[in-house]
């Protein structure tokens, strides 16, 4: 009898320990509650930082950059969501930082959350991880470092991580001004390495081939001076069997052309790019609609839709203040392009099945007719107040209604 009790006691103890561990590392509440949206403020700050510290123009040697906390917070949440389907937040103190992550999981007892907190303290060189916690369970630092190494290896980022650590010299937390000051040693080859991380060499070869196809397509349709997007987009997307890599390459090539950014500038180290003829590409007979549609599609296909939407809305807000004026027609093109890029990025990639060989403008983007345009700051405030008003939301709902009517985006 005692033998039987001992025999059954061990599995029971293991089950109880597993249950205790499960409850210790999971919770019924998420510590990080936020959406995956990228704020317009973060886009604006990133744009300003890029202008001040454009890596294509940085000379070799030591450099210092001050990163706004709000930008780092949004960037951490964006990367965590896009890579790990996890919400994240960053909290900055005077000489320390705390990163929190929350991920939803489904278990036999219902929805649970894994909450992780990583505490980092400032030091003479690079910050040092002082504590890691999963739920209520503290994790030994050697085990945490091993887990980080495994995660980097799985994502194929080990070399890039090591290069980044080698370049960094000192990171200072400034809780009072809510900034992180970074001193690093810059080398021009780092830019090439960063591009190679985002765009593997096999992709670069495909982009070059797509650029040649794009130039040929423009030459064949140049008689009118303006080329409708519908005339060239399907054939480029469906080259090489319409695989996702070809679709991404197509959007990058046309997007770079419409943004007036030569691919030689975007992909350093490559040369002999064919130059497209100076033609206009239109959508609904509008150059701006083609630009907004394709650039949003490109960003969405290579990153995700929330980032593309944030950039589109930021661009319109900037136009309202100092440019051509806020345009709901442009915003409609942004939203349509974002959905188009989402189809490319989706795991099942339904675009190859949904996109016919011949397509009309109205199948790519709803008609912009009737959508308010050219609204300066005063006009926008008089008609819509702000971007949280019912009047503004009514226009957004109208754009979404028109998009839902398009078979391509259902």
Image (tube, rainbow, N blue to C red):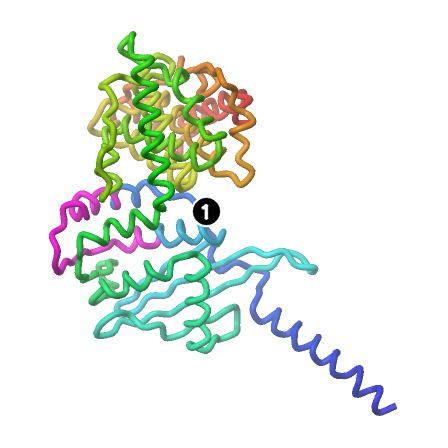
Q: Position of residue 316 (x, y in %)?
A: 30, 29
Q: Which residue is drawn at 54% across and 20% down?
A: 405
- Label 1 neighbour load within 10 Å: few <14, some 14-19, many 20+: few
Q: Which residue is drawn at 36% across and 23% down?
A: 328
Relative to residue 88, is residue 376 depicted above or below?
Answer: above
Q: Where is residue 238 in the image (x, y as percent from the top left)?
A: 47, 26
Q: In this view, does 150 lie to the left or right of 219?
A: right
Q: What stretch is highlighted in magenta?
A: 46-73
Which type of secondary structure does the marked residue at label 1 adopt?
loop
Q: Is residue 225 left or right of residue 17?
A: left
Q: In the rendered image, which quarter contains the C terminus?
A: top right
- Is 66 inside the magenta-drawn segment? yes
Query: Observer-nearest residue: 40 or 131?
Result: 131
Relative to residue 260, is residue 277 depicted above or below?
Answer: above
Query: Observer-nearest residue: 391 or 76?
Result: 76
Q: In this view, does 138 lie to the left or right of 7?
A: left
For label 1, the residue is 35
Q: Which residue is drawn at 40% across and 31% down?
A: 297
Instruction: Let me know if residue 265 appears in the view.
Output: yes
Q: In which quarter of the image is residue 293?
A: top left
- Is 359 inside the magenta-drawn segment? no
Q: Which residue is drawn at 25% across and 53% down?
A: 68
Q: Where is residue 54 in the image (x, y as percent from the top left)?
A: 18, 46
């Amino acid at each position: 009898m005692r033998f039987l009790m001992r025999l059954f006691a061990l599995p029971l103890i293991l089950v109880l320990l597993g249950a205790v561990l499960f409850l210790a590392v999971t919770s019924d509440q998420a510590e990080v509650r936020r959406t995956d949206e990228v704020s317009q403020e973060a886009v604006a700050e990133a744009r300003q930082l890029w202008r001040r510290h454009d890596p294509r123009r940085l000379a070799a040697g030591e450099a210092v950059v001050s990163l706004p906390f709000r930008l780092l917070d949004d960037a951490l949440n964006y990367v965590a969501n896009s890579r790990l389907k996890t919400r994240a937040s960053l909290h900055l103190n005077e000489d320390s930082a705390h990163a929190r992550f929350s991920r939803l999981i489904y278990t036999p007892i219902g929805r649970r959350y894994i909450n992780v907190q990583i505490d980092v303290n400032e030091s003479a060189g690079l910050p040092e991880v002082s504590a890691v916690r999963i739920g209520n369970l503290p994790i030994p630092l050697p085990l945490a470092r091993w887990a980080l190494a495994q995660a980097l290896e799985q994502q194929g980022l080990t070399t890039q991580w090591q290069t980044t650590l080698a370049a960094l010299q000192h990171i200072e937390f400034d809780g009072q001004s809510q900034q992180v000051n970074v001193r690093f040693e810059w080398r021009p080859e780092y830019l090439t390495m960063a591009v190679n991380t985002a765009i593997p060499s096999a992709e670069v070869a495909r982009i070059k081939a797509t650029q040649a196809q794009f130039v040929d397509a423009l030459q064949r349709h140049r008689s009118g001076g303006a080329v409708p997007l519908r005339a060239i987009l399907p054939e480029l997307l469906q080259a090489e069997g319409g695989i996702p890599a070809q679709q991404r390459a197509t959007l990058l090539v046309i997007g770079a052309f419409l943004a007036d950014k030569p691919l030689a500038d975007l992909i350093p180290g490559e040369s002999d790019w064919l130059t497209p003829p100076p033609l206009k590409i239109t959508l609904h007979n509008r150059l701006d609609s083609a630009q907004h549609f394709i650039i949003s599609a490109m960003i969405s296909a290579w990153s995700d839709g929330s980032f593309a939407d944030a950039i589109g809305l930021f661009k319109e807000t900037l136009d309202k203040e100092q440019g051509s004026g806020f345009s709901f027609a442009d915003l409609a093109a942004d939203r349509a392009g974002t959905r188009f890029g989402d189809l490319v990025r989706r795991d099942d990639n339904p675009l190859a099945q949904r996109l016919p060989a011949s397509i009309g403008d109205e199948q790519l983007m709803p008609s912009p007719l009737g959508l308010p345009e050219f609204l300066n700051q005063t006009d926008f405030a008089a008609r819509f107040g702000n971007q949280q008003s019912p009047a503004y939301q009514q226009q957004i709902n109208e754009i979404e209604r028109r998009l839902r009517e398009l078979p391509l985006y259902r």
